[in-house]
Structures are given as C-alpha cells and as structure tokens.
C-alpha cells in the first residue's frame, strides 16, 4: 500500500484524480481531500517505486507535485513535534547519506503543528549535517517533503524528478523584476524549466497574441529575433528594439515566407479551437523541427476532453512533447510541441 500527497492548482484536483484513475486503472485507489480542490491523499494498492515511476512515466497534466508518505507522525502541538521529526530524520540517515538534501514544509490551514518552514528547516538541517547529508536549498539531489496536516505530520523523501518539482508543492516562484511588462512572463519562464527548454538555443520566434509583451521581452532577453503579432499595443519599453518586428494585426491576417521561424509561442486569450485553427494556418511559416509553446484556455466544463481535442488536431502537424498545467497557469494549461 502506497500513500501519496498529490497537489494540483486550486480548483483542478478533480482532474488530477481523473488522470490518476486512468493511470492506475486496475488498481484499487482511494482519495481523501486535504485542502479543498487542491491537495489530496491518494492511497493505492501498489508499491511505492512502482507508483512514482508510473507517475513520472506518464505525468498527469493537472498533477503539479507528488510527495510520498514514508512516515506519519502524530502532531502534539509542542516541542515534541520537532523532537520526533529529528528522531525520524536520524533513523532515516541512509536515505540522504552523502547527498545534498532540501527540506520543504507545507502547513495545512488549521494544523496544530506549531513551527514555520524556516524553524523546521533549521532543526532538520542540523540533523542532516550530523548524519552525513549536506543541507541544500538549490538543486538538491533529494528532497525531504513535509506536510503538516491537521493531526499528522507526513514525511516523504524523493528526488525532484519523483516529486515533479524542486519547489515545495510545485509552487515555483520567480522574482518580479523592476519594469516587468506582465505577469504572463512567469508562465514562459516556468515553461522553459518545466519543458527543459533552452530558449537561447532558438534563433527566430513568432509570438502571436504578444501584447503587452512579457513573453516577447523574455525571448528578446534570451537573444532571439522576435516577430510579435497582436491587434493590441505592445508596452512602450519594447518600442524600437533592434531584434523586434511588431505587427499590429490579428494573427489571422498575417503571412510569412515558409520556414521563417524555429519557435512559435502563442498565449492568446481565445477559444481553444480558434487558436488551433490559427496555429495550423501559420504552420508553413515554421521550419521542420520548430518548437511551439502554446497556452490552451480551458473555457468550458470538460477540460480533459478539450485538451484531447486540441492535441489531436495539432498532432496532424506537430508531435506533442508535454502538456502541463503550470503553477502560473490559471484556467489554462501549457503545451509544448515540435513540428514534424
Ligand atoms: C494573455 S494576453 C498575452 C500576454 C503576453 N503573452 C504577455 O506576456 O504579455 C492575450 C493577447 O492575445 C491577443 N489576441 C487575442 N486574439 C488574437 C488574435 N486573433 N490575433 C492576435 N492576437 C490576439 C489579445 O489582444 C491579448 O493581447
């Protein structure tokens, strides 16, 4: 029996469960909600490694983070909690010996666990150092994830790959920069990491639905030439950039020479099927092997069906590499494709 704490973007856990049911078809599964619409426990009659491997192998779109439950400690609400946690980490010394280990704590609303993430980390780090691990914050080899529920503190070890993220609960944060044009920029920054892309490796990008220009500004920062298409204005700070061509048009009105771009990005606030039609009309402007990063709005009640339909249409021209609801996506997901 394996227990996992699963996290989705708020309001989307029901779809993550749906995907997990499909992934573990034939196994007995039980779900228990921990935080409404967002965090839930999955109990499956399968082995721990088997479960984590299955999830990594076919990563559910709406599952942002997964934490195995290797141990559960009753919460007393006083210093005994830190004592018990230290003991647990000491006894599990072999898991982290010789490795860099990060400690992540999430606290449920209403938990009796009294300590902050920083206080917990300070204590656990000392035990880790004592037992031959190297406490780390950035790029750890292993993460000790802790979830303080109402009555129990759940602890689980896993690599960032197994947990699907190296951020607590998959909630990746970026620093807001001075003069940043839009919050949308965070979506492309997150996509770059989630899809293991090196945007700087591309030469020439087409950005449709570009205004006010957050994505365009990131592509320019990465050194690309960018053609930005939008009937709305770009932010004034982008005007006159030597590598930027701005077309003040609807994307259905533009035409390009064949194979002009090796990257298409599309973050249009539009119906998914109209977006697909536009992208397919512009397909000849992309070179073979070009990448596409596209936001898919989830406009009606059946997101999984919408996603299947969108992907099936795009697969006539592209190969899907990954579809994911990113932490910075709201009622949408992001897909990464490569032109055949
Ligand atoms: C969410 S915003 C894009 C934000 C942008 N990615 C950024 O980082 O600043 C969506 C944009 O899509 C544009 N849009 C919607 N339909 C479009 C179409 N048919 N052709 C071009 N742009 C379109 C809207 O004008 C709007 O500026």
Image (spheres, rainbow, N blue to C red):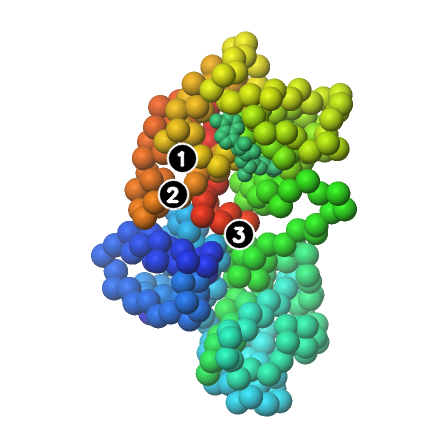
Could you tell me how many numbered marks the image carries?
A: 3
Using the image, tell me which numbered label, if any, was put on residue 327: 3
Q: Quadrant of residue 118?
A: bottom right
The residue sitting at 31% across, 54% down in the picture is 18
Q: Earlier in the sequence, mark 3 or mark 1?
A: 1
Label 2 and label 3: CA atoms lie apart by 18 Å
Residue 91 spot, x, y in % from top left:
56, 79
Q: Is residue 227 visible?
A: no
**Viewer-nearest residue: 104 or 273:** 273
Relative to 261, say whether 58 is above or below. Answer: below
User: Relative to 336, is 47 on the left or the right?
Assistant: left
Going from N to C along the chain, the mark reached first, 2 or 3, is 2
**Image disc number at residue 164:** none
Question: Which structural element holds mark 2?
Answer: loop
Whether residue 236 is visible here, answered yes or no, is yes
Residue drawn 33% across the image and 67% down it: 31
What residue appears at the point 68 percent right and 56 percent down from the top-left corner?
Answer: 138
Q: Between residue 211 and residue 328, name the one nearer to us.
A: 211
- Which mark is on residue 299? 2
Q: Residue 293 location, x and y as percent?
A: 52, 33
Could you tell me which secondary element the residue under label 3 belongs to?
loop
Q: Along the line of sight, which residue is nearer the eye, 70 or 133?
A: 70
| Distance between mark 2 and mark 1 Cα atoms | 7 Å
The image quadrant where one finds the N terminus is bottom left
């Amino acid at each position: 029996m394996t227990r996992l704490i699963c996290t989705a973007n708020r309001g989307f856990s029901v779809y993550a469960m749906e995907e997990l049911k499909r992934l573990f078809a034939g196994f007995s599964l039980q779900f228990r909600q921990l935080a409404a619409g967002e965090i839930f426990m999955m109990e499956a009659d399968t082995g721990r490694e088997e479960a984590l491997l299955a999830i990594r192998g076919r990563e559910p779109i709406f599952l942002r983070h997964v934490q195995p439950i290797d141990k559960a400690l009753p919460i007393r609400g006083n210093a005994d909690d830190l004592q018990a946690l230290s003991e647990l980490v000491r006894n599990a010394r072999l898991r982290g010996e010789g490795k860099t280990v990060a400690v992540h704590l999430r606290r449920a609303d209403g938990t009796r666990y009294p300590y902050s993430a920083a206080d917990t980390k300070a204590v656990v780090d000392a035990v880790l150092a004592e037992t031959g691990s190297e406490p780390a914050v950035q790029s750890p080899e292993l993460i000790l994830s802790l979830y303080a529920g109402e009555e129990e503190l759940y602890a689980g070890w896993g690599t960032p790959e197994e947990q699907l993220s190296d951020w607590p609960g998959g909630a990746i944060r970026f620093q807001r920069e001075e003069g940043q044009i839009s919050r949308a920029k965070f979506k492309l920054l997150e996509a770059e990491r989630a899809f293991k892309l090196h945007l700087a490796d591309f030469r020439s990008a087409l950005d449709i639905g570009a205004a006010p220009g957050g994505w365009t500004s990131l592509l320019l920062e990465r050194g690309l030439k960018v053609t930005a298409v939008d009937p709305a204005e770009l932010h004034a700070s982008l005007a006159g950039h030597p590598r930027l061509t701005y077309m003040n048009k609807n994307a259905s009105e533009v035409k390009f020479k064949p194979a002009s771009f090796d990257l298409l990005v599309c973050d249009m606030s539009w119906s998914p099927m109209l977006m697909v039609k536009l992208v397919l009309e512009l397909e000849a402007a992309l070179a073979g092997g070009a990448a596409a990063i596209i936001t898919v709005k989830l406009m009606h009640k059946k997101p999984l069906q919408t996603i299947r339909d969108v992907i099936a249409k795009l697969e006539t021209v592209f190969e899907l590499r990954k579809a994911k609801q990113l932490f910075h996506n709201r009622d949408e997901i992001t897909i990464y494709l490569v032109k055949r």
